[in-house]
Image (cartoon, grey):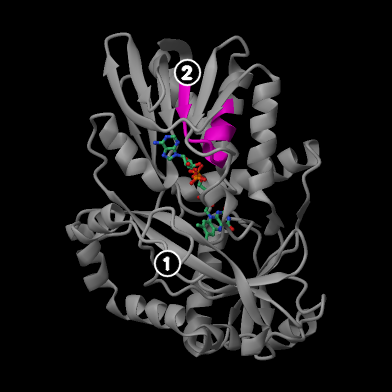
Amino acid sequence: MTETTDILIIGGGIIGMATALELQSRDPAARITVLEKEPTPATHQSGHNSGVIHAGVYYAPGSMKARFCREGVQATEAFCTEHDIPFERLGKLIVATDETELTRMQALGERARQNGIVIEDVDEASLRRMEPHINGVAALYSPSTGITDYKRIAEVMSALFIARGGNVRFGARVVSGEERGGSVSVTTAQKRFEAGRVVTCAGLHSDRIIRAFGQQPGYRVVPFRGEFFRLLNQPDDLVSHLIYPVPDPARPFLGVHLTRKIAGGFTVGPNAVLAFKREGYRLSDISPPDMLDTLSYGGFWRMLAQNPASAASELTASASKRAYLKRIHKYCDRIALGDLAPYPAGVRAQAVAPDGKIIDDFLFVKTARCLHVGNAPSPAATAAVPIARHIADQLLDQAA
Ligand SMILES: Cc1cc2nc3c(=O)[nH]c(=O)nc-3n(C[C@H](O)[C@H](O)[C@H](O)COP(=O)(O)OP(=O)(O)OC[C@H]3O[C@@H](n4cnc5c(N)ncnc54)[C@H](O)[C@@H]3O)c2cc1C
């Protein structure tokens, strides 16, 4: 049996759900269906992240990340306010602990200012006053960084979309898609859909979905586990801001940070180690096809060859809790091994080009009737609403 619809969205993470709502608000009469293979929204990246509303400090000026993140802060706070979802604008300190980091921190401050982000320089004495338990020689202060619960946001988006007449099919895994003439035919394990337009937001499977639609993505997703710990035995006022290290420009991730959770308590993390399964949250989760996909990809080996020190250091921090703790001790030495309790890991979808370069910016692949979200790493949860607006603009542009 074939079901006909105007727009089909594949993937019910925060990007898929934000896109569904945005398209529905632009044309309330359109028939829009979301296909999600899991039983609930935001089961993967959108439900396993740091929960930080990023201000947009880090991103290359002029990039989509820089623009959408800046717009995303306001959009996320507005959505939370309107729908009674908790968020808190805690502010964040990016702490330099030595001279090398100080130089990098100053360059980062410059970048933030180029991005139009409010950022303040904090000297050692002021840092000590702001955060008595944190050690550093200086810091950057970003007052507009905050925290929220992105899983909750995606769930509310899904519920609103359904209440306004949208369709969400859970347990619907898309296996193929074909654009022909005036429509797109999409097949799930259960049935076939015929849609006027298709948007795919498949996260850790974005490259596979693009291939299943007969296109070449031009990259492969390499899954990186991000391991967190929950902090025990620490006072509620351990820190009042989010505490981040100065990122190493050689690494694509932000470093192990100390984050207050919106539901209470603190976590430290995440690191970044190769995952043996695209949606494998435990170290013991292994998928031979997923591993083959990574290990048979020349781009993966070129990436490793370009970042050997970083790969070795991440592996060490994953294998040894003591090595992990050393990263935290750089800026907070009152945390002991026994304070690190298990906390669920996340897996990042990182797009890697055939030459081994990590694709940093958001990436979209557009065909006559489909728009594929290729690369949507952090801060895509913060930027979900502006990304959804961008997708809707592109799709309506196609329709014109
Ligand atoms: C450890 C970690 C920390 C992070 N911290 C932050 C942060 O603090 N702030 C921030 O802004 N961002 C953060 N991010 C990034 C952010 O979580 C992601 O960028 C964002 O959630 C991506 O959303 P998405 O909808 O594209 O992907 P996902 O949430 O992964 O959703 C993709 C969906 O597609 C579905 N799907 C896949 N294939 C199919 C198929 N064939 N058929 C049907 N459905 C399919 C999946 O089941 C999934 O539900 C972090 C990410 C990680 C992993």
Task: Identify which residue is drawn at 52% across, 49% down.
Answer: 44
* Quadrant containing the C terminus in the rendered view: top left
Which residue is under mark 1?
Answer: 284
Residue 210, position in %: x, y? 31, 35
Which quarter shows the N terminus? top left
Q: Is residue 17 magenta?
A: yes
Observer-nearest of 144 and 372: 372
Relative to 337, residue 2 above or below: above
What label does residue 7 carry, if any?
Answer: 2
Q: Can residue 136 be seen at all in this image of the molecule?
A: no
Where does the magenta region start and end? 8-20
Seen at 75% across and 59% down, the residue is 262
Whether residues under marks 1 and 2 lie with C-beta atoms below 8 angstroms apart, the answer is: no
Task: Give the side of residue 38 with respect to residue 157, left or right.
Answer: left
Identify residue type, mark 2. Answer: Ile
Q: What amino acid type is highlighted by mark number 1?
A: Ser
How far across and how far down the image is residue 387, in percent? 52, 38
Q: Tell me the mark number nearer the camera, choosing from 1 and 2.
A: 1
Image quadrant assignment for residue 368: top left
Q: Secondary structure at mark 1?
A: loop
Q: How many marks?
A: 2
Residue 182 horizontal side relative to residue 135, left or right: left
Q: Residue at x 61, y 43 (%)?
A: 71
Give the camera-side residue of 74 and 76. Answer: 76
Q: Looking at the rendering, which quadrant does residue 373 occupy?
A: top left
Between the C-alphas of marks 1 and 2, the distance is 38 Å
60 sits left or right of 181 in the view: right
Residue 352, percent across and down? 29, 55
